[in-house]
Every structure is written in structure tokens, then in C-alpha cells.
């Protein structure tokens, strides 16, 4: 059956948008603090007496080396589940058969869900893709509009896993996926990408290095190469329409669409003052990140659908982008909050006060109120004083999760559908101000387990525990709560019920697309 979509109403307090994604949750990088100097010895000095300053370097950020199998669930009639074109929804996790060229099962070490496609990374550096390929997000010839001008011979089924056509000898070590695009880091720290960035009106905008006369990059292409060891890219994070990367030298690079401030490096713009496309879609450093973090280097990056986060080695956080629901953990500007309250009181559909539904741009993000988006957009890195000692961040469209070093999960942003996982908020009050981070409820056994990973989708949230269990909360309109035919939302964290296909496997990671979810699970069994 076609996917079921919940219509936005006045109680949502947010503009309705086509599903988008935020990248999947990644482990935060932690820099080791330098050993204290020996007694009586100060910093080393050069011959001229000046103190030598060691250049900041990020330690290597690698995906988990433990391999597992892919399981998909949710609703998607376009192949994002990887189960074939005839399987349009799965209310419980179903195994996705990802095979090597020789037919043997691939050892998968990372999964990333895009808006309507999925990416899996093999231990050997191979990249597998499936789902919608209309913008070239699969990086291989398949049926679909991106390849319709080509002969059908050699085209593959987009609804089943297949190998992205990376050049011979290129081995990927990390992947990320957004709404219609895919990126990968190779072993040399260069960035490869394919697909297309969509503009704020949901049309094709372009892609770095796309062939002349085309806005799509249908096959993997190198989009950024480091000039030295400090420029090696160690981490990728994907939003709905933008990307962020962290280099070994601690620089944050961004590229893609930035109409809500998510690039953090372009002047405020709208559809009437659009900057050169090349300035947007070419990876470039974001100034002022270190200052917003209180000094020191950047140790990790993360993205929400339309926002970007940077974490320091001490766990401080800086953020920029869309904050219409407080999803950056920054206070709503007084004018913006007043506008939202007035809109909610008027009962208008999409009552987010016009300051930005998830989509951005005229119409999609609502009417812009001046070049700053009525206080909803933060165009430069801002210190997030409400967060400290943070180990990881996972962003949805209008909400965000933060995992602290003590293992606490905090949530902030829109409470709709229960995606904050807290009993102290009104899930119907979409326009309320919940920018202040607050711990999720420790319900359904979560109190006795240690959280080691988090994930967020458009309207859903998840936590992975050291014990190998998965807890889910938020909207179940597309079966993203993985609980069978029960289509009620999870307003509080609820342990995923294991079906026969999934068994007692240990969950390693979770990622969400617009309407589907994907798990990476090991063969090791979790105690009953």
C-alpha cells in the first residue's frame, strides 16, 4: 500500500514538508589531553625564546570495525528498504541481503539512510546503495529518470542493494547520505560524492563537479582532495540539503544549500539574493567555530536536517542553522517567539509562524521575516551554553538529541509526536519553546542500560545501549517505531520488540531516512 502520511494541523505548530533526513548517529571523537609537563619544565621554546605551539590535530575518527547485517523497516514504495520493488513497507525489521560480487554476504560496518535511499559500507571499502536514484544518489546505472536516456542494457534494480561505481582502487572508510545525495571518505582523506543537492524549492540545484549541462552527478566523483596531512577529512555528517566535514587539522567544511544558515559561512540570502552556486556547493571552511567553542579545536561534527553542530574535545557545543523550534538548543528570538505564539493562537495551518518549517526557502520554510529569518536562522556559529560535556549529537528536522559523556540522553526542540521522549512536554504544543536540553524519560527498562549511541530522523528518535538493545520514540505513521501493526506513536522511549527475523542480535547502530529506518546488527546474541 502507499505510504501513510500524517497531515500537519494547527496543533503541529510546524510547516508540513516532504520527508527529509538527517544523518545517522556517529560516535563522537575524543582527543586525549596532553600529559602534564614534568615538574620544573615549561613549554618548549624556540631559539628566539618564543613558545612553540603545537598545531591542533583531531585523532582518527573511524567507523566501528565490528561488522554486522542490515535490517530495514518503515514505509517506502521506492526501494529504500532494499527488499525489492514489491515490498513497500515493513512494520518489523527485515534482513537486507547485501552481497559481495562473488555472492557471499558482505561484512557491513556502517549504514546511512538518506531521504529515500540507503547506503552501506563494507569492511573492504565497498559502498552499497539502494532506493530512489532519480537524482543519481545510488552512484550506479539503474532504472529511473537519472538514467532514462541510457540504453537499458546493464541497468540494475534500484530497489535491491548494488555496488556504487567507485573507481578501481578507491576504498571508502566512511559514508553519509542526505536527500538525494551520497558522500564517502576514501583512505587518503579525500571526499567522493554523487547525486544532487536540491534547492529551497525542492528542485535540482546542482552538484560539485557535475558534467556540463547537468545538475546531477550520476557516478562517484572526487569533490575534495586534501592539500596536506592536516587537510585529510576524518568525519562526514549529512543534513537534508547540506554536508559538513571535519579535517584532521580541526577545520569544519560545509557545502550544499544554505538558505537556513546551515553552512555557517555565507551571508544571509533568500531566493532574491542567491549567492553563486559554486560558493555553496564547494566544500569550504567555516570561520569562527573555534571561537564559538571557547577556544581549542573541533573534535566532531553533526547535522540536523537544516542545522550543523560542532563539538570540542571538552564536550562544548557550537551550532548554526535553523532554530525555529529550538532544535539548536538556542533561545528563540523574542520577535520570533511572539510571531509563533500569535500564529498558534490564530490556528493557522503550519503554525510555525512562517519562520521555517523543515524545508527552507519561500513556501517550504514559510515567509521569511527579514534577512535573519525572523530570528529562526543563525548564519554563523553560536556557542550553545546549555550543553556541556557532550559526546555525540543526532539531529532530526525540528528536534535534536545529545548524548553526554555521563551517558545521559538530552532532547530539545519540537515535542510533536513524542519525539523528545519526555513526559514533561505537551506533544500537541508544537509551537511551545522547548529549546532547553532536558533528559529523556528512563522508561521501559532504559534506566538499567547504558546508552552508547543515538539517532534521529524527521520525527523519530532512537538510542542504542551497550547491552545491544534499541529504544525508539516518536512518530509511527511510517512504521518507524518497528512495532508491528500497532501504529500508535511512542511518546516515551520504548524498547524495540524483537521479531523472529531479527532474533536476539545485538544492535550496533541505527539510522533513519524520511520514511524508513535501518539497523546494523551483529550476530552476537543479547541475553533474553
Image (cartoon, grey):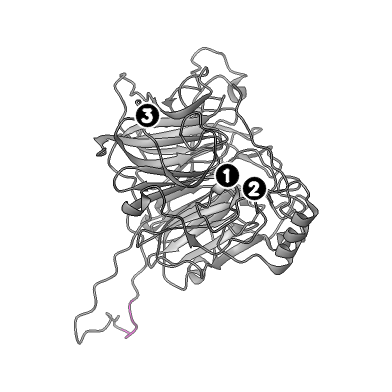
Tag 2's secondary structure?
Answer: loop
Q: Kindly indicate the quadrant of the structure image that contains residue 249.
A: bottom left
The Cα–Cα distance between marks 2 and 3, rounded to whole angstroms, is 33 Å
Query: Does the magenta run of residues contain 94?
Result: no
Can I make out residue 209 in this image?
Answer: yes
Magenta: predominant secondary structure element?
A: loop
Can I make out residue 186 in this image?
Answer: no
The Cα–Cα distance between marks 1 and 3, rounded to whole angstroms, is 31 Å
Percent position of residue 92, x then y: 44, 29
User: Which of 456/300 is in front?
Assistant: 456
Residue located farthest toward the left when viewing the structure as drawn: 39
Residue 275 vs residue 310: left or right? right
Residue pictured at 55% horizontal, 41% vertical: 475
The reply to whether the C-beta atoms of the residues labelled 2 and 3 are less than 8 Å apart is no
Residue 488 vs residue 297: left or right? right
Residue under circle 1?
240
Point out the frontmost of discs 2 and 1.
2
Residue pictured at 68% horizontal, 67% vertical: 333
Point out the frontmost of discs 1 and 3.
3
- Span of residues in magenta: 48-52
Q: Kindly indicate the quadrant of the structure image that contains residue 174.
A: top left
Establish if 45 lies above or below 102: below
Percent position of residue 372, x then y: 71, 62
Q: Disc number at residue 499? A: 3
Residue pictured at 47% horizontal, 30% vertical: 484
Amino acid at each position: 500500500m502507499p505510504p501513510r502520511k500524517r497531515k500537519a494541523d494547527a496543533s503541529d505548530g510546524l510547516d508540513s514538508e516532504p520527508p527529509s533526513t538527517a544523518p545517522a548517529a556517529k560516535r563522537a571523537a575524543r582527543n586525549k589531553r596532553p600529559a602534564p609537563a614534568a615538574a620544573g619544565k615549561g613549554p618548549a621554546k624556540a631559539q628566539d625564546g618564543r613558545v612553540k605551539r603545537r598545531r591542533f590535530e583531531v585523532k582518527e575518527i573511524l567507523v566501528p570495525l565490528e561488522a554486522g547485517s542490515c535490517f530495514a523497516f518503515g514505509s517506502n514504495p521506492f526501494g529504500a528498504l532494499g527488499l525489492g520493488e514489491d515490498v513497500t513497507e515493513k512494520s518489523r525489521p527485515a534482513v537486507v541481503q547485501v552481497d559481495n560480487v562473488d555472492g557471499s554476504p558482505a561484512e557491513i560496518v556502517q549504514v546511512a539512510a538518506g531521504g529515500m535511499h540507503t547506503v552501506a559500507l563494507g569492511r573492504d571499502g565497498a559502498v552499497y546503495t539502494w532506493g530512489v536514484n532519480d537524482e543519481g544518489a545510488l552512484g550506479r546505472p539503474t532504472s529511473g529518470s537519472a538514467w532514462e536516456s541510457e540504453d537499458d542494457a546493464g541497468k540494475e534494480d534500484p530497489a535491491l542493494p548494488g555496488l556504487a561505481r567507485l573507481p578501481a582502487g578507491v576504498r571508502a572508510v566512511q559514508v553519509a547520505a542526505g536527500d538525494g545525495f551520497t558522500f564517502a571518505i576514501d583512505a587518503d582523506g579525500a571526499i567522493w560524492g554523487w547525486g544532487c543537492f536540491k534547492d529551497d524549492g525542492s528542485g535540482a540545484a546542482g552538484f560539485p563537479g557535475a558534467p556540463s549541462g547537468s545538475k546531477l552527478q550520476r557516478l562517484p566523483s572526487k569533490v575534495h582532495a586534501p592539500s596536506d596531512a592536516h587537510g585529510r577529512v576524518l568525519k562526514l555528517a549529512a543534513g537534508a540539503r547540506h554536508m559538513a566535514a571535519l579535517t584532521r587539522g580541526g577545520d569544519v567544511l560545509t557545502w550544499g544549500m544554505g538558505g537556513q544558515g546551515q553552512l555557517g559561512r555565507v551571508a544571509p540570502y533568500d531566493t532574491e539574493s542567491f549567492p553563486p552556486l559554486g560558493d555553496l556547493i564547494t566544500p569550504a571552511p567555516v570561520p569562527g567555530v573555534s571561537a564559538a567553542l571557547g577556544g581549542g579545536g573541533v573534535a566532531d561534527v553533526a547535522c540536523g536536517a537544516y542545522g550543523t553542530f560542532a563539538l570540542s574535545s571538552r564536550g562544548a557545543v557550537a551550532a548554526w542553522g535553523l532554530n525555529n523550534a529550538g532544535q539548536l538548543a538556542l533561545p528563540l528570538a523574542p520577535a520570533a517567539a511572539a510571531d509563533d505564539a500569535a500564529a498558534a493562537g490564530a490556528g493557522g495551518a503550519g503554525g510555525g509562524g512562517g519562520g521555517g518549517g523543515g524545508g527552507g526557502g519561500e513556501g517550504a520554510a514559510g515567509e521569511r521575516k527579514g534577512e535573519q529569518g525572523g530570528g529562526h536562522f543563525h548564519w554563523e556559529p553560536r556557542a550553545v551554553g546549555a550543553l556541556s560535556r557532550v559526546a555525540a549529537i543526532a539531529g532530526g528536522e525540528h528536534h535534536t538529541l545529545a548524548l553526554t559523556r555521563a551517558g545521559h540522553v538530552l532532547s530539545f526542540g519540537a515535542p510533536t509526536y513524542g519525539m523528545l521522549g519526555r513526559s514533561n512536554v505537551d506533544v500537541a504544543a508544537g509551537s511551545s519553546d522547548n529549546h532547553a536540553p532536558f533528559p529523556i524519560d528512563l522508561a521501559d527498562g532504559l534506566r538499567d542500560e547504558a546508552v552508547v549511541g543515538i539517532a534521529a530522523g524527521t520525527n523519530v528518535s532512537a538510542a542504542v545501549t551497550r547491552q545491544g538493545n534499541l529504544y525508539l520514540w516518536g512518530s509511527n505513521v511510517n512504521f518507524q517505531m518497528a512495532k508491528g501493526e500497532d501504529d500508535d506513536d511512542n511518546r516515551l522511549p520504548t524498547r524495540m520488540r524483537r521479531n523472529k527475523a531479527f532474533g536476539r542480535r545485538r544492535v550496533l547502530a541505527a539510522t533513519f531516512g524520511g520514511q524508513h529506518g535501518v539497523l546494523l546488527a551483529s550476530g552476537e546474541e543479547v541475553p533474553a
